[in-house]
Amino acid sequence: MGLNMTPLADVQEVAIRTSSKEIVIENPEVSVLDLSGIKIYQVAGGDVVEKTVERKTTIPEEDVQLVSQQANASLDEARAALEETNGDLAQAILLLSQR
C-alpha cells in the first residue's frame, strides 16, 4: 500500500465555496497525500476568512412562460414569483394563484 506525502509549494490561498458561503484560507500550508493513486489535499494554518454569499437563481425563460400560463399571470408577475420562490415552479404557481 503506497502512501506518499509531498508539500505543495507557494500556495497563496485555498477557497471552499458552498451554496451559501465562501471560506478562503490565505497563505496556508498544503500537502498532497497520494494513497494508491487517490490524492488527498491537506490544508493547515493560514488566515481564515468566511463570508456569506447570496447567489441569485437563474430563471429559464421557459419556466417563466410555464408559470405565466398555469397561473394566468403576466410574464413579469411569473418572473417575480419564481425569483421569490428560488425557481420552484409549483410554489410560484401556488403563490400567484392565491393572489
Image: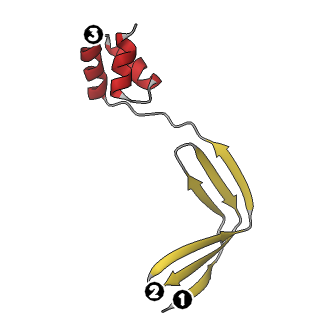
Q: Circle 1 — which element?
A: strand
Task: Give the amino acid type for the residue marked by disc 2 in the picture.
Answer: Ser
Q: Which mark is residue 44?
A: none
Q: Residues within 10 Å of mark 3 (few under 14, many from 20)?
A: some
**Quarter of the image where one finds residue 76:** top left
Mark 1 near mark 2, Cβ–Cβ under 8 Å?
A: yes
The span from disc 1 to disc 2 (Cα, nearest Å) is 7 Å
Extreme residue toward the bottom, this view = 1
**Quarter of the image where one finds residue 60:** top left
- N-terminal of the two: label 1 or label 3? 1
Left or right of 58, for residue 47: right
Q: Which mark is residue 3?
A: 1
Q: Which mark is residue 72?
A: 3
> Which residue lies at the image location 29% right of the left edge and 13% below the top edge?
71
- N-terminal of the two: label 1 or label 2? 1
| Vertical side of 89 occupied by 76: above or below | above
Rendered location of residue 19, percent (x, y): 52, 45
**Quarter of the image where one finds residue 24:** bottom right
| Vertical side of 64 occupied by 9: above or below | below
> Which residue lies at the image location 60% right of the left edge and 45% below the top edge?
21
- N-terminal of the two: label 2 or label 3? 2
The span from disc 2 to disc 3 (Cα, nearest Å) is 59 Å
> Which residue lies at the image location 42% right of the left edge and 18% below the top edge?
80
Q: Residues within 10 Å of mark 2 (few under 14, many from 20)?
A: few
Tally of numbered tags: 3
Rendered location of residue 20, percent (x, y): 56, 42
The foreground one among 58 and 40 is 40
Residue on which the image places disc 2: 36
Task: Give the amino acid type for the residue marked by disc 1 in the picture.
Answer: Leu
